[in-house]
Amino acid sequence: MSFIDKDNLTIVSKKNITGTKKIDKIVATIKMHVPAGEAKPVAPLAPILGQHQINGMEFCKKFNELSSVYETGVPLPTKVLKMSNGKFEIKIEFPMFLFLLWLMMGEQFKNSIKAEELYNLINVYAKGTTKDVKVASKSVFGFLLSTNLRKVTI
């Protein structure tokens, strides 16, 4: 395809390139915690998504589908990436360690936890977050010490 540039009076040609994929820019990033399998297009999700012109029903369907591998109700750290073409991507991260510990120790951290269970929990957390087990265990024990949770039994 060619046309005449009227300012310079030259012929300019444009080639149609097929097979190239246009990379869409990320316009907005939304970070939130959404319960696994329980996303509904009502408040508080609807206003947050609506600010960025993201269809709430479509988001809920995709999120509930993606989060079906987790137990229902587990709060999942979620990133929603709004693209320049109007589409969006959902990135679900691994559940927070504090929530996993809360599940194991019960509400108000009343129960004690065995060292073996804590070790297994650290391994699960490390695999889910792609951290090294050593790094994960250091952060876990740092957390336990900082919150005075000394209910680990051997």
Image: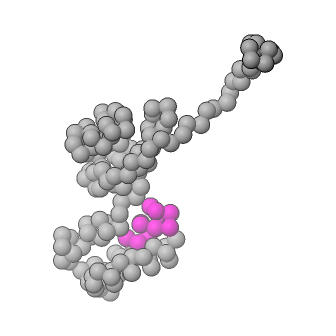
- Magenta stretch contains residue 124: yes
Q: Residue furthest right?
A: 10
Please report the bounds of the magenta region as a residue range.
121-131
**In terms of depth relative to the viewer, which is nearer, 79 or 94?**
79
For the image shown, how many numbered marks are present on the structure?
A: 0
Between 17 and 6, the residue placed more toward the observer is: 6
In-front residue for pair 53/36: 53
Residue 6 percent across, percent down from the top left: 74, 14
Structure colour scheme: one colour
Q: Nearer the viewer, residue 19 or 69?
A: 19
Residue at (50%, 63%) from the top-left corner?
130
Query: Is residue 71 magenta-colored?
Result: no
Is residue 96 found left or right of 72 in the rendered image?
A: right
Q: Is 69 placed above or below 55 here? A: below
Q: Quadrant of residue 94?
A: bottom left
Q: Is residue 94 depicted above or below 142 in this figure?
A: above
Q: Residue furthest front?
A: 7
What residue appears at the point 24 percent right and 80 percent down from the top-left corner?
112
Q: Position of residue 72 (x, y in %)?
A: 26, 51
Q: Specify whether residue 70 is in view.
A: no
Task: State the predominant SS element of the stretch in magenta.
Answer: helix
- Residue 44 appears in view: yes
